[in-house]
Amino acid sequence: MRPLSTSVLNSCALTLQQPTIADTYAAKELPIAQAGLLANIGPDGAKSSGAYPGVVIASPSTSNPDYLYTWTRDSSLVFKALVDQLIAGGGPAGSMSSLIDMFVTAEASIQQVPNPSGNITTGGLGEPKFMINKTAFTAAWGRPQRDGPALRVTTLLTYAKWLLQQNNTSYVTSTLWPIIQLDLDYVASGWNLSTYDLWEEVYALSFFTSAVQHRALREGSILAMTPGHSDLSNSYSLQADRLLCFLQVRGNVAHLSDSHVRQSFWNSTSGYIVANPGVQRSGIDANTILASIHTFDVDASCDATTYQPCSDKALANLKVYVDSFRSMYTINSGILENGAVATGRYPEDVYQGGNPWYLTTFAVAEQLYDALVVWDKQGYLSVTDISLDFFRMFDMSISTGTYTTSSSVYGTLMCAIRSFADEFVAINANYTPSDGSLAEQYSRTNGTPVSAVDLTWSYASALTAFAALEGQTPVTWGAQGLSVPSMCYIPVSVTFNVDAMTVFGENIYLTGSVPALSNWDPSTAIPMSSVNYPIWSTTVSLPADTPILYKYIRKDANSVMWESDPNNAFTTVESGSQTLDDVWR
């Protein structure tokens, strides 16, 4: 079934009612993508290269680039696709459940592995990747990456809800919940901290990370009631509310009605979601498209609070993102300005030459298919000032308003957008080799596959895009009816005092783990006052009831000296102010 009702299909051109290139490609590629994905899962996958049971290799590629590792993010997204298939009845339930159970066992083991990010209680859950025998990867890397635990939560929660429907409560409470709780506790205690993003290049805030963390906490607060942990449920729900504020409002603000409040990730001037605020590039990034599809909840309609696929902000963002690649790649030359194009991670990308990715181009199609499903379900679509430019790609004369199924405009738009979505799938089809294998990227100049071969995430992205093409929707997670609390977390005033002797020309600065403390960047660290020397002081506004890490540094004209390890740590008070008195170490 395509994601359009019969009434809408009848208003489409006859050619659109026939199998499209996207349909034909999906029918052919789906079993290949399924086989390619399974081939990269240990121990029996044909290309799993000795991976332990339930361990997902990113790719069998071992040079330029070497991807023969297991990433928490990739593994969780891969198994989320398989769990969704299980729930939709897309394969033998017994064999699929056994494979998912192996993944559960593998992840429970990996959680406990000490690694360069720490151990189970000191930050180790943020370690991004491991060896395929479930031992630590100890070389230099971009760490921590805080999206992995949240994505693992989503995968295991989705599986848990299905198991509860099968009356398998014991496995959920005894096996799944302990794994889920460890990850939820990690997310709840550090969602406001900087992170390396999903591309492993930028250490900053990340829209994708924050969005999937919010989903994990929101969904986790509901499941926590099943094992009878009402205290945890309340805690996760509270942090989810705060994270929702964080997604919507920049900085440490009190009342949403304040005139100076600015959106954290939404660029209202240019009409797109900024993937990594504060980073010196455009912020236009597939990060935001992936966030929309991986937090899709069909019951949430077109809610912009959680940036649902058909929300005005998500649609405006999609247009800006797609348009940024129109003149970027040679293979996009000559395509009409309202046509689909191959897309990559972000316009400034230079990795492996900076090419289109299969998974990012599939993601655009998937967001559009998800939007079509919701519009068809609710029987109308709304055009706002924010989304107007998106809809004018398909009807230059359209104006803001709500268009119902009784309107010819509704049918015209639905058919045009479906065709637009199909074109993105068709682009990937055009650059898929005859054997159906999907690498990480394809060349910006001639479309030949480049970078890692048989990328597991590429295969998973094909499977989820094909499911969306057929109108399938993942299980809901609780996004319906959410609203930003009338009062987001109130900032508290924290005074830092440190007893530090200095020599002429030296000054003491403060830096730490949150944006208000310069994200550990010594070049922008906060200068402290020496009025009460040898006590150096500064007062900073920080979010309430939040864990913070910090250090003092000495700077002179030529050098920077950090105080010795470990980091100082505290949790801000729930309201009011507090003072910290330290001695230089």
Image (cartoon, grey):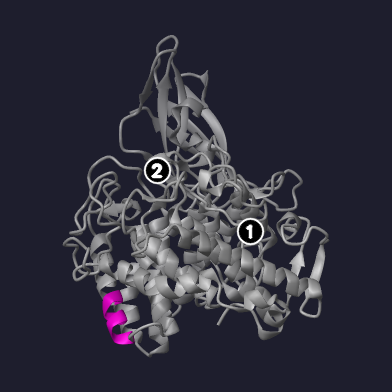
Q: Which residue corresponds to the image point at 32% horizontal and 70% vertical from the top-left?
A: 178
| 143 on left or right of 154 | left
| 256 on left or right of 449 | right
| Residue 374 magenta | no
Of pointers 2 and 1, the one earlier in the residue sequence = 1
**Considering depth in this image, is 228 or 251 the residue closer to the camera?**
251
Disc 2 crowd rating (10 Å Cα; few below 14, some 14-19, many 20+) is few
Q: Which residue corresponds to the image point at 75% horizontal and 52% vertical from the top-left?
A: 257
Q: Measure the alpha-carbon separation of dots 2 and 1.
A: 37 Å
Looking at the picture, does residue 328 appear above or below residue 302?
Answer: above
Q: Amino acid at mark 1?
A: Ala
Q: In the rendering, at what x and y percent does residue 149 appear?
A: 38, 60
Looking at the picture, does residue 281 appear above or below residue 30?
Answer: above
Q: Which residue corresponds to the image point at 70% horizontal and 52% vertical from the top-left?
A: 255
Secondary element at tag 1: helix
Query: Magenta region, mostly helix, strand or loop?
Result: helix
Q: Quadrant of residue 306?
A: bottom right
Q: In the rendering, at what x and y percent does residue 394 appear?
A: 73, 61
Q: Which residues are magenta?
A: 93-100
**Considering depth in this image, is 493 or 200 the residue closer to the camera?**
200
Disc 1 designates what residue? 314
Disc 2 designates what residue? 569
Is residue 389 shown to the viewer in this render? Answer: yes
